Amino acid sequence: MVQKVLRGRGRLARIAELMDKLNIKKPLLVSGDHLAAVFAEKAPGVTFAHFKGYHPNPDYADCAAGAAMYRENGCDGLISLGGGSAMDTAKAIKAMLIAQDEDKALRSLLPEDAVLPHIAVPGTAGTGAEATQIAVVYVNDQKVSISHEALMPEGVVLDADLLDSLPEYHKKACALDALCQGIESWWAKAANDESQVHAYLAIIGVLDNIRAYLLGDAHAAEAMLEAAYRSGRAISISRTTAAHAMSYQITKKLGLAHGHACMLTLPVLWDKLIDHEDALPALKDLASKMRLGSEYMGSRLLAGMLIDLGLEPEAMPDEATLDALADSVDVSRLGNHPMPLTRDDLKKIYRRAFTRRAGADRQVCIDLWNYYGK
């Protein structure tokens, strides 16, 4: 399925054109109150029902309530407006509606020919969920990924105007999510030529634009939104690897945003791959694509970025927390990572991730990031 994509500032005001192409007359808008008001202002001629009853990590019960609202209001399509949670909620609502059975929806047993159009409008430059067929929801506090090609949004609006009012930490964390997805997609076992093209565009898009984006540059914001979209396209093919798998409980236990949590472990995972012979060719190629002189510079560039962004770990978690983090990762689900990792490996990676760089090594990281791209 080829997505219909509207790109450019102010394009949200033209969403009715996309709705016409997808035959949507009355959508269920999945968003928070603020963005619902923005939508009503930008698209005044659109009649919609508004579902806001979802959480940052969408609960499956929330999605069931959204599906009920869709039916009650006679909706004929979905529009998600916001971050990954809004888009994942909309996808899960769609899964419930087309499966007509909650258990089948959870098991990704969806009909191939169901027609229920969904337009995704990202309000952040990060998750890339507008370009994936995956909905992440929680059932009894357990993460469940619903994955089916029917969940790929048929339409996308990339409007950088929506990024301008985001809090700075949110901008940083979302940018790091897109960068992590690009890097993880590149080295994933399931990567192919197509996914690596998207991964490359995501990686370079973030590295080349994040500074200007955080300073308020309008063109950089558009480039970051495109990079995030590309990161989603990449992982829709390759899926993510260990950094994402290790991030969820960091967010839950320590309160760090998802992208921030992913980036804490990524430099450590990079260094570990250098010692794994089978992964080294892909790592060398990635370092070259990132315009680095050596694969040894990759982790230091990422660490230097974290330092510059003010996102270094503040403190080392206690042993009980490190154990809980390591225990939370299902090692059997790390099969897409370029090398095997044991529970002991995971704990060591967490420990290193929360250890602040010091001395000459820290200065190398800072200098590498400061001079990168200049």
Image (cartoon, grey):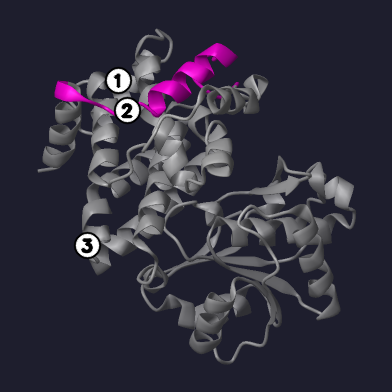
Q: Are marks 3 and 1 in contact (CB under 8 Å)?
A: no
Secondary structure under the numbered disc 1 in the rendered image: helix
- Distance from disc 1 to disc 2, alpha carbons, whole Å, reads 5 Å
10 Å crowding of disc 3: few (<14), some (14-19), many (20+): few
**Residue at the (25%, 28%) spot, across then down:** 300
10 Å crowding of disc 2: few (<14), some (14-19), many (20+): many
The residue where tag 2 is placed is 286
- Distance from disc 3 to disc 2, alpha carbons, whole Å, reads 28 Å
Side of 361 where 156 appears, left or right: right
**Residue at the (54%, 31%) spot, across then down:** 246
Is residue 123 positioned above or below 229 on the image?
below
Side of 75 where 37 appears, left or right: left
Query: What is the x, y in percent for residue 90?
Result: 68, 62
What is the magenta range? 335-360
The residue where tag 1 is placed is 284
Secondary structure under the numbered disc 2 in the rendered image: helix
